[in-house]
Amino acid sequence: MPSVLSFLALASAASAAAVPMAHIEPRQIAGLSGGLGALAGLFGFGKGSAAKPATVSALPPLLIPTAKREIIRWGPYTLPAANAKHTGFSLDPGGTPISGQLAGLCSDCYFLSGSTYVTYANGSRADIASGVYNHHVFVGGMGIQALNPFGCTPGAKPTVTKDGVPITLPADNGIMGMLGMFGAKGGAAPAAMAGGHSHGARSVEQAKPPKSGGFGQIFGSGDDGVAMTYASRDQSLLKAGLYIPPNVTVMHTTELVNYKNESQVVYITADVEYVPGKPEGYKDASSGAMSATGCAGVGYMPPANAKSTMTSPPYIVKMDGWIYNIHAHLHDGGINVRVLKNGQEVCDSKAVYGGKGSTTVVGGKEWATIQDYEFCYKPIEIKVGDKVQLESNYDLVAHPLRPGAQDHSMGAEAMGMVGYAFAAK
Ligand SMILES: *[C@@H]1O[C@H](CO)[C@@H](O)[C@H](O)[C@H]1NC(C)=O
Ligand SMILES: *[C@@H]1O[C@H](CO)[C@@H](O)[C@H](O)[C@H]1NC(C)=O
Ligand SMILES: *[C@@H]1O[C@H](CO)[C@@H](O)[C@H](O)[C@H]1NC(C)=O
């Protein structure tokens, strides 16, 4: 399953552009971030009034004792039956798209963490075990600052091995096809994820931190439910959060899939943690993502029925700071993503499959989805000039594709990315 959102995710302050949505697919993009610049229009931004939460419940904080934690639910939304006619643009053929402005998220606050899932009116979870798949919920805001510490190596290509043997991916492979379309812009970064039509190489000259005021992701997730977390686990090493200004306009774009032949009524649900105001000592954090494909499209198709490894060209560090809370973003079939700093492994984030709510039977076959990733929480210091590479590993023998996923004929539609938090020095 490919991912549009990741693209969106990483776009930064790009000017309005007709991004060919049909080629992108956002899934689980959750943990990946950035700005949605060009795509803001797709979010129903500016249209209608903001959806008020149906319920808000306070819970004890998980990350920082002085923080506030809330479960916020928006809805109800009706998902048509699987066998009903689906209208509107969706990334999954059976998907129901939902978008618009959201009220109820904190403002003038340091946002520490947020994840999403889906619930029924009674509060119990709607998950694939009950026929609901969270393709993605993506929440962003106007006025969110996006810092990008990584620049691209113009023209550099990733290397790929199949069962240990170096290969060249065919030119019509996803990554090549997207190369020109999703070049970096606005210094956003890892071009891979940027929006707009410009070529990736431009990212280098434009690589400077954009000022606040653009559209940036706040949080979001797919069925893996992975939180986007700006707080460091070790407050003695680093205090950081994403600042949400008082005048923020929050909006979301969501797609949910109903596998049942009856409609289901659900609520988009967010679990968020934040500290009000601007406490002293906090550093501004941003979330970001980069891809093993390097500064090209993030989607690619690893060879079917094989183990494969894609290694990115080096990303060049352009700002001093720390990356932390690093986690892989893979599609089913993915094993892990390793992060190398100047050739040394600094993180190995593995996918975790199956388990309660993440295993079901589709078309008579058991199907386990990625449920979580192993995180690398510890802040890793990066300095201007450091070289960072990603290595993405897939095994399509051990983990077959999602039943009903698009483009079975072409093998998996994969991504090999990491999402991270970055705090500037
Ligand atoms: C749902 O409906 C489709 C087409 O109407 C049918 O092929 C399928 O078997 C149905 N699934 C279930 C679980 O009833
Ligand atoms: C909550 O609602 C869902 C959907 O209507 C239902 O399937 C589930 O059994 C309910 N759970 C409880 C605990 O009532
Ligand atoms: C929010 O307010 C700040 C400070 O007044 C201003 O610079 C910024 O443009 C405003 N942002 C939006 C999205 O209105």
Image: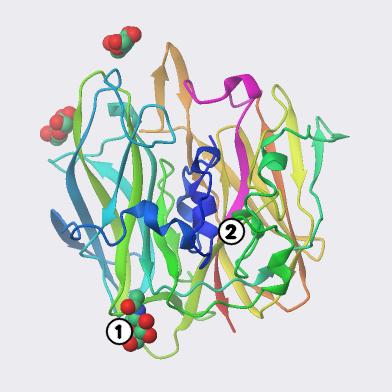
Find residue 194 and name its label.
2
The reply to whether residue 232 is visible in this rendering is: yes
Q: Which residues are the magenta region?
A: 398-419
Query: In the image, residue 70 lies at what x, y percent?
Result: 23, 62
Q: For the C terminus, give its image quadrant.
A: bottom right
Q: Where does label 1 land, which residue?
A: 277
Residue in the image at 44% along x and 36% along y: 91
Which residue is outermost to the right? 166
- Calculate the distance from the C-alpha at mark 2 to the C-alpha at mark 1: 30 Å
Element at label 2:
loop
- Packing grade of label 2 (10 A; few <14, some 14-19, many >=20) is many
Number of callouts in the render? 2
Give the percent coordinates (x, y) of residue 329: 56, 47
Task: Please determine whether, in this image, residue 52 is positioned above or below residue 276.
Answer: above
Q: Determine whether, in the image, residue 345 is placed left or right of residue 275.
A: right
Does the magenta run of residues contain 379?
no
